[in-house]
Image: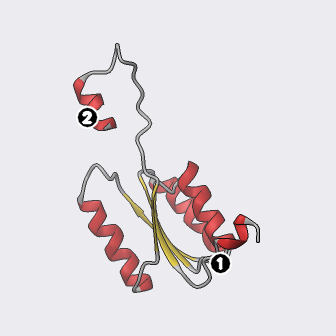
Amino acid sequence: MAAAEQFRFEGQTAIITGASQGLGETVARMMIARGLAGVTIAGRNPERGAAVRRDLEGLGAKARFVAGDLADLNIVDRIIASHEAAFKTCDVLVNSAAITDRGSIIDTDAALFDRMF
């Protein structure tokens, strides 16, 4: 059995952070292709998140989007509440949210270091 065939998500639901673009979006698409029934995606960009949500629904899954930055811990409560209201349970959690700030050992100040780690 191929590795891709081992990971099926028939009838399951997932919460995926950082899914309004990049890796999180790709994971959501892959999981839907493998049977995921419902997904709550979260990301910082409301317009991009809404567009991704529509695309995911077009692939056959029920999808929700919650806009916010995980630096604000209150967003976590909103993500969970939104998911529970739509799906009642969560089978899979994918944490792919990240910041895109960059710095070198020379030019990274303490505030940037704290945001990155």
The image quadrant that residue 79 belongs to is bottom left
- Pointer 1: residues within 10 angstroms few (<14), some, or many (20+)? some
Return the x and y of residue 26 as percentages of the image width and height: 62, 56
Q: CA distance from mark 2 to mark 1?
A: 38 Å
Callout 1 amino acid: Gly
Identity of the amino acid at label 2?
Asp
Residue 11: image x %, image y %?
Answer: 58, 85
Q: Earlier in the sequence, mark 2 or mark 1?
A: 1
Task: Spot the residue most to the right.
Answer: 1
Q: In the displayed structure, does residue 8 sit left or right of residue 40?
A: right
Can the viewer see residue 28 in this picture?
A: yes
Q: Is residue 64 visible in the rendered structure shown here? A: no
The percent position of residue 95, horizontal first and vertical second, equals: 43, 57
Residue 15 x/y as whole percent: 45, 68
Residue 114 has which mark? 2
| Residue 35 marker | 1
Label number found at residue 92: none
Check the image and report above or below for 90 versus 23: below
Q: The N terminus is located in which quarter?
A: bottom right
Element under disc 2: helix
In front of the other: 15 or 58: 15
Q: Answer with left or right where residue 106 lies relative to residue 45.
A: left
Camera-nearest residue between 56 and 111 = 111
> Dot 2, crowdedness within 10 Å: few (<14), some or many (≥20)?
few
Residue at (25%, 53%) from the top-left corner?
72
Against 39, is 50 above or below? above
Residue at 58% x, 81% y: name it: 37
